[in-house]
Amino acid sequence: MEKVVVTGMGAVCSLGDSVGELWDNLLAGKSGFGKIERISTENHESTVAAEIKNSEGFESVCKKYWTRRQLNTVTGPSRLVLATAVEAIEDCGIDLENYDKDRVAVIYGIADAGFEDAEREKMTNIILKSMPSSAPSLISEKFGFHGASFNLSCACASSGYAIALGAQLIETGVYDMVIAGGTSNYVTHDNISGFNQILAMSANPDPETASRPFTKNRDGFIFGEGAGTVVLESETSAKKRNAKVHAKLSGYACYSESSNMTAPLEDGEGMRIVMERALKKAGVSPDSVDYINAHGTSTYLNDKYETTAIKNLFGKHAYELSVSSTKSAIGHTLAAGSVIEGIVTIKALNENIVPPTIHYDVPDPELDLDYTPNTAKKREINTAMSNSYGFGGQNVSLVFEK
C-alpha cells in the first residue's frame, strides 16, 4: 500500500493571504477578529467575526490564472479555494508538462457555494455560482487534471473528509496525487442569524474576548472566513520527482456518531473513538503524540468533551502533550477548518513550535490540560494530530509525522 505525503500547502484567512503569513501571525499571537463589516449587524446578536478584510491579495492570484469571465461564474468563497490551490500547486513544484495528469484528482470539502448577500442582490450566473463543484472543476480545467473532480459536504469536517478520501485513493493506487481542501462561507445574514438560533455563536461584542477556547467564560464560537488546500501525493511519486515533503499523513479516521445533529456524544466518546482509530491507522501509540490541534470551538460542550476524550484516550500522557486551538485566532472556518488547521499542525511539526490558544484568560477548573495559553511554545514535535467535529456527528482526525 502506498504511503501518503504532503508536498504542497496553501491558505487564505483573516490572518493572511498565504501559509507563511498565517503562520507568522499565529506565532505572534495576533487575532483575526474584529467588528463585522461585510453586513449590517443591527438585527444580530453576534457582531464579531474573523473576516477577510482585504481581498486584493487572493483576488490578484485568481486573476493571473483565470479569466474575468470565469471568475464571474463563482462566488467569493470559491475564489478563495482557487487562490489556495494556486499556492499549494506552486509549492509542490509539479512539472505540469511531464506529470501524468490522468493520475491527479481534485477533491474539496464545501458545505455550500457561499452566496454572499451582495451577490444575491445581483443574482448573475446563478446556475454556476450555485454549484459547489465549480471550484474543483475550474482547478481541474486550468491545470489539466483528468482524475475525479468533485466536492463533498460533511459540515465542519468537510475538508478533513476530503483529505481522508484523497489519502485512501492514493494508498490504493487509484491516483498518484490529490489536490484536497475546503472553504468557508463569507459572513452573511443567514449564517450569523442561523448559528445564533442554535446558540452556537458567541454574542460577546468584544473581539478580544468573544472567542476563548477552553476557558471558564467561553460562550460560543466566532465565524471565520477562509480556505485551504493541500497537495497529497504518493511517497513513490514524490521521491521520483525529488519533491519537497512537508509531512507524512500517516493516519486518518472518519466516524459518524449517529446520535444528534448538533450535540456530541456524552463525555466525547465519539471524539475518543475517531482519534483512537486514526492513531491505529497510523500505527503509532497514543504516547507518541506530541501535539494536538484541537477542534477547540469555544463552545461549552465541545471544549469539555474534547478534553475528556483526550484524557480518556491518552491517560497520563494527556498531561504531557501540548494542545491548542487555531480557532482562537481565525475563528471557526466551517468546512475549511480541517485543512487550515491541518496546515497549521504540519507547520508546528516542522518547526517544533506549538501555536498558542490566544484570548485564554480565566481557566476552567474542569479543563486542566496544557492548552498553550496566549504564547507559542518551543518543543520537539514528531507526531501531531488535528481534530475536526461537524454537525451531524461527523468526526475526523488526521495524524501527521515528520
Image: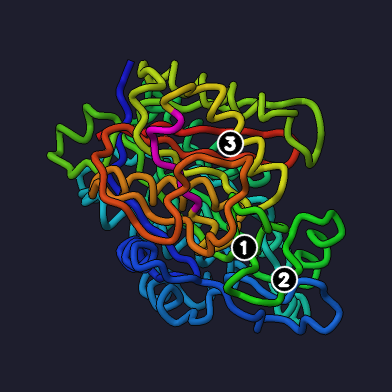
Q: Is residue 184 above or below residue 390?
A: below
SS of the residue at dot 2? loop
* Percent of width and height locating residue 124: 71, 76
* Percent of width and height locating residue 164: 49, 32
251 to the left or right of 97: right
49 to the left or right of 28: right
Residue on which disc 3 sits:
307
Tell me which corner region of the image, top left, top right, bottom left or bottom right, holds residue 323. top left
Residue 96 included in the magenta stretch of the image: no
Please report whichever mark, 3 or 2, sits nearer to the chain's N-terminal start: 2
The amino acid sitting under disc 3 is Thr
256 to the left or right of 249: right
Within 10 Å of disc 2 (Cα), the crowding (few <14, some 14-19, many 20+) is some
Please report whichever mark, 3 or 1, sits nearer to the chain's N-terminal start: 1
For residue 103, say whether it is visible.
no
Residue on which disc 1 sits:
211
Q: Which mark is residue 63?
A: none
* Percent of width and height locating residue 43: 86, 79
Residue on which disc 2 sits:
204
The amino acid sitting under disc 2 is Asn
Quarter of the image that includes the N terminus: top left
Name the one closer to the observer, 162 or 342.
342
* Percent of width and height locating residue 11: 41, 60
Name the one closer to the observer, 376 or 113.
376
Residue under the image location 33 percent in, 41 percent down = 101
Residue under the image location 40 percent in, 41 percent down = 322
Q: Which residues are magenta?
A: 318-325
Quarter of the image that includes the C terminus: top left
SS of the residue at dot 3? helix
